[in-house]
Amino acid sequence: MSSLQTGPSKLGMHLIAIPAAVSVIVFLGYSSQWLFSTATSLEPGPLSTTESVTFNTLLACLWWSYLRACTVDPGRYIFDAPGSSDEEKPKAPKTSKTSKAPKKASRPSSSSSSGSSSHSPTAGETAVRWCRKCDAPKPARSHHCRHCRRCIPKMDHHCPWTGNCVSMQTFPHFVRFIIFTNISLWTLAYLLGRRFYSLYAQRYLPAYLGPTLPQLIHLTVLGLVSAGTTLALSIMLYTTVQSWMFNATMIEGWEIERHEAVVDRYSSTSSDGSWWGDDDEDDEDNDDDAAYNNNGDDEDYERRERRERRARKATALRMRIEFPYDLGIFNNMAQAMGTHNVLLWLLPFASGPKIATASGSSGVGWDWPENGFNDRTGMWPPPDPEKLRHAAAQGKWPASAGGGGSAAFASGHDEGERQWGTPEEEKAAFLARQEADFRRRRTKITGPVRQVGSDDEFELGMDGEPGWTNADGDRLRDYGVDEDAENDEDVPIATLLQRRDAKAKLAAVSAANSKKNK
């Protein structure tokens, strides 16, 4: 079972969800059979042998699938101890080149909730996804669950009704549970329908010849609960089978919808890429270059910087990226179930795919085949406007911000060339940019909805809070994703290692000071 998130509301939801689901199954599945067998005046009477065997077989498949969906581990990434072999380094995206620099020592592994030991990639590796909560690389299609408190392979969502993540390893059991539940509900609807029809046909008979009042109340409650549950589970069946056929998790469906909204909205804006309330500043920058003061003052530099930033936004956000994991309906379904044998897909006792643990950096759950519709692999997920805001606020742009554009353009200079010429000039330019960033942050640190250090306003979601939501008003946290762990993706490994080393040193100093005080 997965760990429960702290907090009274979430904890209470997790505590009552599974007992509530079990209670509904017991009430609909077994109290109905008890009513049919005891209410002799309720036509057509007790279930026949065929009906009883069929219904109870479906219930047995339902129970077993539900048990497996609740108890099967959703998967965990285990990284080999660094320094034992050259294969222990996490794979960087295929588009980036890794240098064979000596491995850096990492902190000893601990029995954390992530279930993985700390792994130190080489300083030469760049732009791999990194989870700052697990302090480890984050393979493609994985997300950090705020309930399980670790990165989950191919995370679909965290289901409170199973108390577990729907992931690469648990999806086959979850989809079987949903299918068997719906078939059981349809069977129960047929059985209840026959009895309601019998009551309607006997509506002119004296009341004492029919079922008693408690039996009628029981039958009515069964019908209402069955109808509501069937409606909810039918919607869940539709979304689950859709995810199964198109090989897109709920989280990836959210990303697809956000990407299409961003591309459509941004492509309809002005050609200079103005968006998020930049229009007023754009008017100031439309002056002729001759009107600029070329004395190297901060105001002139900030104008150029804003134009470069808008150009990067335009490149990153106008490019439409195809969802790369849709391999065709049959291949999608076979990949999700871990086998091409169709007969095993709905077998309750069948297993599912298992994450590869031999190499610790490749195989099932680590690498995912792509359909080749994009210019290169590793382009998903597409650029996130929120990450671009954070990057702009911190004065940096991730190498992957172009979403398929070259890293050279995203970094602002041509590949193989220095932007400013000599190292001394580049250093001076960096110091000037840094000072301008500090000055701008000090002057724009106040404001109603502005990001600190950024010229962009937050977009409000359907719930009225800053940040994007899909058409249903959902955010990533609604699927169980720890959004705080998502903000450090695509940060260079060297930067992350420096942060981790600084954090470790600070912890060591604090521990030493506490010992001295004692």
Image: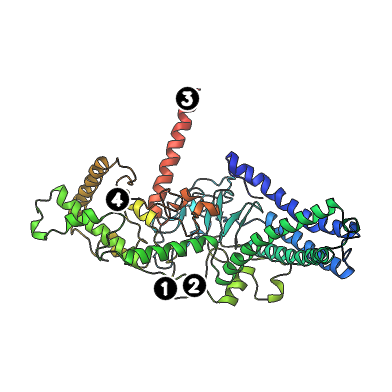
The residue located at (59%, 65%) in the rendering is 239
What's the distance in space between the residues labelled 1 and 2, CA to CA? 9 Å
Of residues 277 and 422, the one drawn nearer to the viewer in this rendering: 277
Amino acid type indicated by mark 3: Lys
Q: Which residue is mark 2?
A: 370
Q: Earlier in the sequence, mark 3 or mark 1?
A: 1
Q: Count neighbours of disc 4 (C-alpha within 10 A) and say few if under 14, some if 14 to 19, many if 20 or more.
A: some
- What label sits on residue 374 in the rendered view? 1
Residue 158, horizontal then vertical, whole percent:
59, 54
Query: Closer to the camera: disc 3 or disc 1?
Result: 1
Q: Say whether residue 293 is visible.
A: yes
What's the distance in space between the residues labelled 3 and 1, CA to CA? 58 Å
Q: Which residue is mark 4?
A: 395
Of residues 1 and 161, the one drawn nearer to the viewer in this rendering: 161
Q: Are marks 1 and 2 in contact (CB under 8 Å)?
A: yes
Q: Label 1: state its secondary structure.
A: loop
Answer with left or right where residue 137 lies relative to residue 73: left
Residue 247, horizontal then vertical, whole percent:
55, 69
Amino acid type indicated by mark 2: Glu
Give the number of callouts. 4
The residue located at (30%, 42%) in the rendering is 447
Query: Closer to the camera: disc 4 or disc 3?
Result: 4
Of residues 278 and 225, the one drawn nearer to the viewer in this rendering: 225
Q: Earlier in the sequence, mark 1 or mark 4?
A: 1
Q: Which residue is mark 3?
A: 516
Amino acid type indicated by mark 1: Asn
Answer with left or right where residue 337 lies relative to residue 488: right
What's the distance in space between the residues labelled 1 and 4, CA to CA? 29 Å
